[in-house]
Amino acid sequence: MHLPSLTSRLRVIMQRRRTRRALLGLDKRLLDDIGINPEQARREATKPFWKP
């Protein structure tokens, strides 16, 4: 695999991981603002990093 491609993939994976973890810290009001409920947030946050 080409190094820039690998670097790009790792960057996407790390961003996905950070974003999903952040969902766990949002309260119901903020989850409502983004249009998801706590169960949806939990499901998204617990997805493996390799799944989009």
Image (cartoon, rainbow, N blue to C red):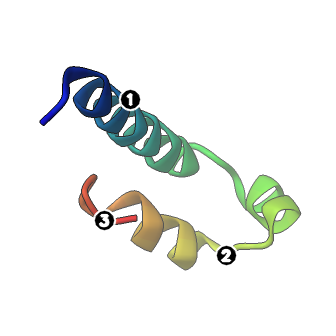
- For disc 1, the neighbor class at 10 Å (few under 14, some 14 to 19, many from 20) is few
| 30 sits to left or right of 51 | right
* Rendered location of residue 32, percent (x, y): 82, 67
Location of the N terminus (image quadrant): top left
Which mark is drawn over residue 21? none
Is 33 rendered above or below residue 37? above
Label 3, secondary structure: give it.
loop
Residue at the extreme front:
2
Look at label 2 and name its amino acid: Asn
Q: Name the residue under label 3.
A: 51
Q: Nearer the viewer, residue 50 or 4?
A: 4
Disc 2 designates what residue?
Answer: 37
Residue type at mark 3?
Answer: Lys
> Counting other residues with Cα less than 10 Å from the Cα at mark 3, is it few (<14), some (14-19), or many (20 or more)?
few
Mark 1 and mark 2 lie on one chain; the one further toward the N terminus is 1
Q: Mark 1 points at which residue?
A: 11
Residue at image position (59%, 70%) is 38
Q: Do the residues labelled 3 and 1 touch (CB within 8 Å)?
A: no
**Residue 30 locus on image (x, y percent):** 80, 53
Q: Distance between the residues labelled 3 and 1?
A: 14 Å
Q: Which of marks 3 and 1 is nearer the N terminus?
A: 1
